[in-house]
Image: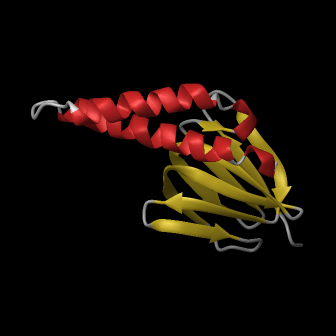
Amino acid sequence: MNTFLLEIVTPEHLVFSKQVNSLVVRGVEGELGILPGHIPLVTPLQVAPLSVKVNGETITIAVHGGFVEVHKDKVTVLAESAELPKDIDLERAEAARERAQRRLQTRSKQDEIDHRRAELALQRAVTRIKVSAGKGQQ
């Protein structure tokens, strides 16, 4: 068996559910490649694109935090939010990136919480832009 079931789930809905050949995610300790028969594990995810191989095609999906849970023949990504390339509004993502960069440049010392929010917003925007740029890979 050279595939496993990949499900990407957010609190709102099931984003992706298919038999896939491989998956690459960015965990808190770096990139992690998952192939059929991978040992079981659970690890937190960074805000970063994940890459899925399905029948020779690569699909990139924007994932904004969460966890990956690996079982014998199924992998579940429990994400705070996730977006397929076709669902990303590139103009909106670029505007969000610019807003976040401005906020990071003008922050005050006592405003550490807003700084962290701006960093996360910037990471999400950059992830969306990277995934959207790869729309032709579907």
Give the camera-side residue of 37 and 117: 117
Position above or below: 97 against 1:
above
Quarter location, residue 129 = top right
Task: Give the residue at x 57% y 68%.
Answer: 32
Q: Quadrant of the N terminus?
A: bottom right
Instruction: Judge left or right: residue 130 versus residue 55.
Output: left
Give the camera-side residue of 49 and 69: 49
Seen as rendered, the residue at the extreme left is 109
Task: Give the residue at x 13% y 31%.
Answer: 108
Q: Position of residue 47 (x, y in %)?
A: 49, 47
Position above or below: 34 against 89:
below
Instruction: Judge left or right: residue 124 versus residue 103.
Output: right
Position above or below: 3 against 15:
below
Q: Position of residue 111 (x, y in %)?
A: 16, 30
Q: Position of residue 97 (x, y in %)?
A: 44, 34
Task: Give the residue at x 63% y 54%.
Answer: 50
Instruction: Judge left or right: residue 84 versus residue 10.
Output: right
Give the camera-side residue of 12 and 132: 132
Q: Position of residue 137 (x, y in %)?
A: 79, 51
Task: Give the residue at x 74% y 44%.
Answer: 135
